[in-house]
Amino acid sequence: MLCSPEVIIRVEDLVYSYDSVKALDGLTFEINRGEFVGLVGPNGSGKTTLLNCLCKLYTPQEGSIHLNGHNLKDLTPLEGAKIYAVVPSEFPADMNISIVDTVLLGRHPYFEGFWWESEHDEQIVSGAMERLNVLDFANRKLGELSSGEKQRVLIAKALAQEAKILLIDEPVAYLDLGYQLEVMEMLTRLADEGVTILAAMHQLNLAVKYCDKLIVLDKGKLVACGKPQDVVTQRLIEDVYGIKAIIKNIPRAGLTIIPLSTSNNGGMFDRENRKERTIGFNKAKARSGRVDV
């Protein structure tokens, strides 16, 4: 199927199953070049599975994925690495190498013959580190950095890879509020420069504030795809997350989600019927100390 030249990611009828459980159930969507897209949904909705399919870690049973005009299944690992880069939420603790060597790993798809970086590689690495404000501690070890600093290093590594697409799993996980805003603003600037970003996120208010588009998943299905102001409604929050919420457009803050009720884990809210449940025993009896079992 032909796509607009602006489309850099196209997913069509994607299905991935773990044994008998469909983790992804017929997903179809498009992402344009330079868009910052938030992949959101409750735990178990299929966000990480989708990212794993997009980076060829998992092979879907049905459907197709096209990245930058290429069918993903036809790309070799080195060809794919020149199109997309993966930014994990965590980095192996035992890989305690220097910051500059970590970022230099992003140049691996371009090395020819022996593992030996060229002057051009060094310039790209230095430029990526400067953009992410990690050049000043280039010789420190990765294990010595804070979570926010590590995240900036991993993004610098992806930039050194010169990938057109960044696939990011939980970009602000484990970060305090200041680092969360710093990372999201950094990703926004990269998207403005033409890098396409797909980030799986739990922080819905941050996704609404910074992302150009949201892809909302629930139980492996695509629930909504579009601009945050078009997608995020009280009905969607109730249906997908099982909570009641107020959606407000607050001056200087923008669209904001204010949760009102707890999730259905406590049995107080019925996601199917969007109404409060009654406690499973008579309140009058409870007050009198008599409870039927």
Image (tube, rainbow, N blue to C red):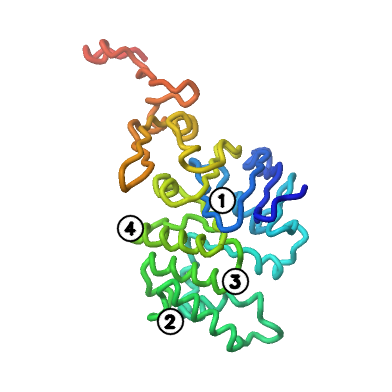
Label 4 sits on residue: 176
Neighbourhood count class around disc 1 (C-alpha, 10 Å): few under 14, some 14–19, many 20 upward: some
Give neighbour class at mark 2: few <14, some 14-19, many 20+ (Cα, 10 Å). some
Position of residue 138 relative to residue 179, above or below, is: below
**Mark 2 element type:** loop
Q: Earlier in the sequence, mark 4 or mark 1?
A: 1
User: Residue, x 71% and y 49% (percent of image)?
Assistant: 60
Tell me the element at label 1: helix
Relative to residue 103, is residue 33 drawn left or right? Answer: right
Q: Do residues under tags 3 and 2 come within 8 Å of each other at their CB atoms?
A: no
Q: CA distance from mark 4 to mark 1?
A: 22 Å
Name the front one of labels 3 and 4.
3
The residue identified by callout 1 is: 48
Give me the disc on residue 162. 3
Q: CA distance from mark 3 to mark 1?
A: 23 Å
The answer to whether mark 4 and mark 1 are in CB contact below 8 A is no
Say which residue appears at 55% left-offset and 44% top-offset.
Answer: 215
Determine which residue is flagged by label 2. Answer: 138
Counting other residues with Cα less than 10 Å from the Cα at mark 3, is it few (<14), some (14-19), or many (20 or more)?
many
Name which residue type carries label 1: Thr
